Amino acid sequence: MKRLLLIVLTVMILGSSLASAAGTEPMLKKYSDLSYGDTGNDLYGFIPALNSTVVRPWELTSWTGIFTFPDGKSTKFSNYDVFNVKRNVDDPNFDKENGFGLVYKSQSALGDLFDVIMKDQTVGTKQRAYFRSTFIQSADDPVFSDGNEFYYSVSRRWFLRTSGIVQRMGIQFTKTNKVSNSERQALYKVTKWPMLKATATGGKLKVDYTGYGVSERDIRIVATKKGAFPDFKNVVSLTGGKLVHTSAAAKTGSLSVNYEELATVLGRDIDVVIDDGYGRTDIQTLHLPDPPKPMDYIPTKLTLTDGHQLWLKWKYVGEDFKAGDYIDGRGIPNIAKVTVQGPETGKQTLQKMFSGVPKIVKNGQEFSQALGAVQLGRTPGTYKISVDAFVNNPSHKDRAVEAPNEAYRNNEIKADFTIKLVPVDLIAQSITATPSRVEKGNTSVITAKVKNVSIEDQKQVMIRITADDKMIYEIRKDMPANKPISVGPVNWTGRQIGLHNMTVQVDPVNEVPDTNPGNNIASTGCTVYQNSGGGSTSGCSTASKTSTAKSSWTIPYRYIYEIAEVNRPLWTTAWVNYSEHLNVSTQINTKQGIATDQTHPKESDRESRGSWAIIPYAKQNGLNANEVTRAGYGYELKVTTNYQTDWETKVPRGFNETARPIGGTYIGPTPGEAIAKFYDRNGNFINSIKLERTSGGNTGTAVWELPKREGTFLNGTKVLERKVYTDKDWSDGDVLVKVYVTAEGSKGRLEACTTNKLRIFGSMFDDTQNVRSRNF
């Protein structure tokens, strides 16, 4: 009996528990009469699974909602309300895979959803309330109406899709999770809370911020009185009244404003607030430093130098202060607006940040700064220069702090200047590299001459020497009228093989109103070569009869590409590609290819007297008879060279006679640069002979031959000929003849070479009359 009672009680308790679980009420219950398991036929709205807006039968079911926060903690609740719908109206069952969460469309219902999501989050009371208030107002947003994909009607009640509305909390739906046939989960990821860092130094309030989110939003950054949040009635926008619109997952930015303007409106104790567009806020409290009183920058003098440099002088009046507290790290912004009237007219603005501020600024301390050169023009005559300048430019966003605000009103100073320009022509007369060819690692001495063609001396003119457009020397020198002056010497070490452009330029920064800036530059070349150690034999080990050497290089030219306002030349540099090539071909001629005829003797028979045997031998062995000879006979050597280059055919064109050619010519091989080397039957070097140019000009194609020498035949006949003779005791076989040709090129020397074979067949003694008497 006791056992039966225990079973009954267990069943009753378990049944009670099951009934309690099954009876969990939907979140929307208090806004409607719906319960889990209820069905209907009139759900109208956008069905994500169908990608269409339709009317469908529905069934209300319970899922578990899981919201994961950036710290890894999660909020869960089991009464996440989901409406299952039928894919087709007449389907027998509801498809759980088509289900989606809905929340009742009211501020109260959205408040319930907010509270359950945020229940475990530690947020300041005011910030939580502001966030909640911002979110629940979405219920009344007119955008949520018929046609919006997040808006639904069910049995004459209105709902919002949960995954859509929580985006306005910075929350993103990630996926659904099937736990079992009866249990489903909706998983969400909550993005980070916004962050900001605010500092007040140098008279500036600087703010770095980051806002996170999952949708388009407008980030707001403001300053309020300390403790005023969430009252935004009396705030100062730190973004110029504009919102920071973004759709980025993480929007990072920085801003800087003069905090004295904030202090005037809000006082010295402020809160800096970022609203990330969802109502999530970060707040930082700051005390704005009290400024010294008074604090004033007063301009005292404008000066225009002989070189037309405009100088501004000013002093500080007020209490001593630490510069970092009231002056931006870049310095004090100064500006001058200049109007030029005369033979040429124009306007220009000169402005600079003065960075020479000491750590402690003291009362009465004076400062001065060169704002830049005033461009007058290049036409001689009388010019009137009107200057309107401001120290600590009141309109600049990074101006230094002055107090009271009236102190900004005395920052202006004006002045007029009159300058008479006489004709000036600065000329770069020449530049020289000595020597103009240096071995790699050695030094060339660079010197130049410049001149001032004028009736007036020019003071401290900048003169610059460059190598391949890189400055190697710069100096300012007085240039007396009509007197050449020397520049340098400058030692320059050749570290890179090739041709280098050395230039001298007078007034490269356009400080002098030169009537002809095109002649302010002169150029010359300096070649750096690699010592080959007595001649290279690379590439001459084969029997090739032709060889080609090629080279290419790039050279800079500096020239005027445009004349800008007030007739100011604008310079640029163009790098131009050039190339060259040297081709060498060699021909050996033994004259044994000329057949002799005993019955009809001729003058050439004396040179081809071995042809009666050599011609058949050459034919049988696939040789050229004119490349076969007897031991002891001579042969001719003819070398043809072809050198071509496009050097300085592509000099850029520019204004005022620029660019300047570098100069120099490359003409190919010159006498002494074509050498023949001869070897014996064992490959041992015998002798070398410099070839003579016998035809061709200084460029293009030329022919080189052996020098003339006197020879004697067996019969005693003496002849003057261009031949070299083989040794009478050589055995049959090949001997080598190598030809080396060099030419002055852009990268040291071009080298080309050929290797030729000469076949020895028989001896000169085989060609006596008794041998020749045989029939052939």
Image (cartoon, rainbow, N blue to C red):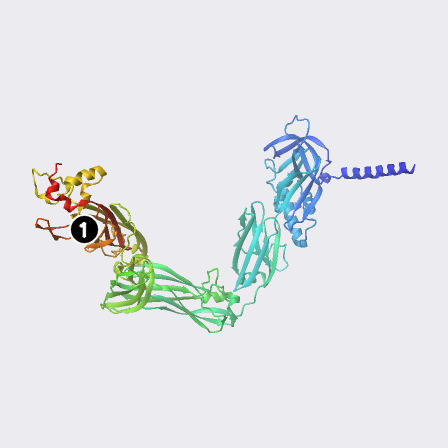
As drawn, 474 above or below 738: below
Task: Residue at the far front: name it.
Answer: 770
Residue 730 vs residue 316: left or right?
left
Q: Quadrant of residue 154?
A: top right
- Image quadrant for the N terminus? top right
Residue 216 visible from this viewpoint: yes
Task: Residue at the far top: name it.
Answer: 90
Residue 668 visible from this viewpoint: no
Looking at the image, how many numbered discs can be counted on the residues? 1
Q: Within 10 angstroms of label 1, few (less than 14), some, or many (20 or more) residues?
A: some
Is disc 1 placed on a helix, strand or loop? loop
Q: In which quarter of the image is residue 502?
A: bottom left
Closer to us: 271 or 436: 436
Residue 596 in picture, x, y percent from top left: 11, 40
Residue 442 in picture, x, y percent from top left: 31, 63
Question: Residue beneath label 1, please?
Answer: 727
As drawn, 670 above or below 358: above
Residue 197 in picture, x, y percent from top left: 57, 58
Closer to us: 123 or 505: 505
Mark 1 residue type: Asp
